[in-house]
Image (tube, helix red, strand yellow):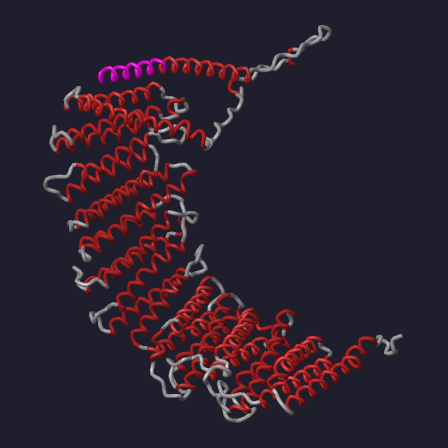
Amino acid sequence: MAFLIFIVLLVALWALLRAEKAEQRLRQLGAQLDTVSQRLAVLEGGRAAPPVPVAPAGPVLPESVEPPPPPSSIVPHPVSPAPLPVAPTLEQTLGTRWLVWLGALAVALAGVFLAKYAVDQGLLGPAVRLSVGVLFGVGLTAAGDQLRRRSPQGGQALHIASIPAALTAAGLAIAFACIYAAHALHGLIGAGATIAGLAALSAAAFLLALSHGGSDGRPAGAFIALLGLGGGLAVPALVPAEHPSAWALFGYLAVLNTATLAVAWRLPTAWLGLPVLGGAALWVATTLGHDAEALPIVLFLIALAAAGLGFGRLILRDGTPRTALTDAWLATAMGAVPLLLDWLVLTATDYDAAGIAGLAILSLLAVAAARLAPVTAVMEGLAPIAAGIVTLALAQGYTAQGAALPYGAQLGVAGALGLALAMAGLSALGAQGGNPTAHRPALWAWTAAAPLTALAWAGWTFDRGTLPDGAWVAVATALAGGAATAAAWAGAEARQRPVPTAFVIAALALAGLALATLLRQAWLTAALALLVPALASLETRVKAGPLGDALRRGALVVALAVAIRLTLNPWVLTYPLNGASPLNWLLWGYGLPALACAAGAWLLGRRRDDRPARGLQAIGLVLGLLFACLEIQVMQTGTLTSDPFALLPTSLRTALFLVVALALAGRPSGGGPVARVGARLLVRVAAVQVVALHLGLLNPLWSSEGVGPWPVLNLLLLVYGLPALLFALVAWRQEAAPARRALVILVLVLAFALLSLEVRQAFHGTRLSGGPRTDAEWYSYSAAWLVYALALLGLGVRTRRADLRYASLAVLLVTVLKVFLSDMADLTGLLRILSFLGLGLCLMGIGYVYQRVVFAAARTPATGEPAP
């Protein structure tokens, strides 16, 4: 039965070949006919125009007859260029490609099921079944290759649908499965023969992939190559060796990957590099889990990077613009992924010398590939990527316990690699004029400046006494001088595209390293802050240009570093203080940096008001506010670790925010965007603090804090009275009506709270929470609120402001509700009589004022005459 099925399949394939041959002959005849028609059209288009008929009455003079044009003057019709290939639609992709490959998979499964059927039925022995399977796979492969040979035109249906490639792939898969089954399931062949057979199939797949190629930009052969790569990668896992050897394994994988990348270049299909990288990562990670030797893995990674970058460069040079970006990213991955895998090797082998050597070689390969890349913006990004990976890998090595290399040797290797990357970056910058369209100087500047700077900082940070402080100061100073020299060279105006910023920031970072070696705690912060006005002063002496802009940005970077150190560094709270005295380290730790940033902002603003100048203004403002807030806490408690949310320091901070906001808003011409935005933010912060803390959590009515024994002259004036006054000044200067209205409401609420709490303080003393309430205290609230309402009414009438009169009515409504709902029940005797009597007289007096003053003014015309 199996033979019959096999014969039927062969007959069907023979019939398909014959039909394809006849169809191909018809297409060739049609193509020849089209060619003849085109040549006739060209000849007719270039023929001389027919003579114009002349009347017989007029003789034709011989001189009027012109000779016919020479054959060389016959200009054929221009041939229109071939249209660009159009991207296939989803329907075309599914109908002409994926269905075909699914059919190939079905054919391969048919072979498997055929073998299973023969086994189930006991028709043939294992050797015969597997031999038939191999022959069937070889037959399918030969059929696919024969179809390819008989349809050479790339636009024909079979090639468009990838039918020859699909048949070839199905045949290879069947043969691969049969050879593996002969070894793993039946033991018919040994491990060596199995490996040789499977490797031969992978090699055959690569050759067939080159033969099939692709059509219309669709590399059908790439799928055959992918099949060969997958089978080749699986061979070491499917057929394990009796004596495993990392050298044999990675040598085999290096050959396999190189062959795949060569096929990818010839097709061309750069995406084949992705499975190559995936397989390499899988085998490296698996091998490292079994304590393998590092040297063969490192050599494999070097071979992988060299092949990937070399063939990637060829693909970019010969590829089409349509795929240049994608190919460039894939080529960049071919340089970056081996570096990451080598970092993994270093981590697994405790920074073995082989891994470090591989890291150096791989980084130089990546930088060279980026330097010699064709015109593409992506490939040049490989240089800083490689520099970043090398820096991180070596910096992690400083922290490794029990590293194979001693710390001093690690520092030497890091210095050598950093200098090599710096030389490569400077060399690329020096050759900028050679190819300005492909050169991205900023990337090369960071490649040259960043690694050495970061490695120096990491080496000093994790140094365990290998080098003395004096040596670190000398190294940092020398490197800072070199970076400064490079900044002056890279920022020269004669250069086509000056890029001094990276070197300026590197010089500042290295100068900071020297200072960090010599100074500690607040003195280091002060020394770093003094660099800001120094850079700003230097910028004023440099001619406006790229170098001056780099100095401005450098000043801003230093200021940001100082601000981060002072705001996000929790250890500043543990620095020793001088008791509650304001003469402590905060003066030079916060006050001096604030003044330095303000001075730098002023110096930079003399030339122009740009982002660096505004950034220094903002940082100076923030540091100044932090200095004042911390001094308030120190003077209150004598320490920085105490609770900052007490009633007195909170009220002082609120007053500070409002005073600074008034000062910023009162500067000439608005003070710039930093002053305007800063004033708005401070007012909002103060308002939130007042509502949440003064009136909420820290309200002495339910908190346990005392307000002082003296009536009126106590802490309540500072907590509620002073903020109300400052908010009133802010509202008076406020132009936006919604914001002014909100501030006025807040002022009225604060005044009401002050008046009420002062009444309670008069009866309870320093502690307002708890204690019995007397009738006199309860009556005093009504009286005080009536006086407050009358004062608001009088002020509203005098200033003709309706919002104050509405506030007066609101307070009156609260008082009326209290009298009628509470005083009637709680008060007794004379106090209840006085409460209602006073309220009634006040209400009648207020009504009289409204009739005689408020509405009378509204009824009087503008001429001053009485209204009719």
Against 692, residue 129 (above or below) is above
Give the quarter of the figure containing the C terminus: bottom right
Find the residue positioned furthest to the top: 56
Q: In which quarter of the image is the N terminus?
A: top left
Where in the figure is residue 697, as x and y percent of width and height? 48, 77
551 in the magenta segment: no
Q: Where is residue 196 in the image (x, y as percent from the top left)?
A: 16, 31
Residue 356 is at least partly visible in this image: no
Which quadrant of the structure image shows residue 48?
Answer: top right
| Residue at x 53% of width, y 81% of height | 655
Q: In the image, what residue occupies the spot 53% across and 19% down?
A: 74
Query: Outermost residue, bottom direction?
Result: 710
Kindly tell me whether residue 547 is visible in this rendering: yes
Q: Where is residue 705 in the image (x, y as percent from the top left)?
A: 46, 85
Is residue 166 or residue 844 the one in the foreground?
Answer: 844
Residue 257 in percent (x, y) is at 25, 39
Judge whether 850 appears above or below 164 on screen: below
Using the image as rendered, state which of residue 391 and residue 293 is in the foreground: 293
* Image-based side of 306 in relation to 831, left or right: left
* Magenta span: 1-19
User: Magenta span has 11?
Assistant: yes
| Quarter of the rendering containing residue 252 | top left
Q: Name the dominant secondary structure of the magenta segment.
A: helix
Q: How many numbered circles are shown?
A: 0
Identify the residue at image location x=34%, y=16%. Answer: 16
Q: Which residue of the protein is positioned furthest toward the left in this rendering? A: 243
Q: Is residue 77 above or below residue 558?
A: above
Instruction: Give above or below for 796 relative to 104.
Output: below
Is residue 709 left or right of 431 when viewed as pictured?
right
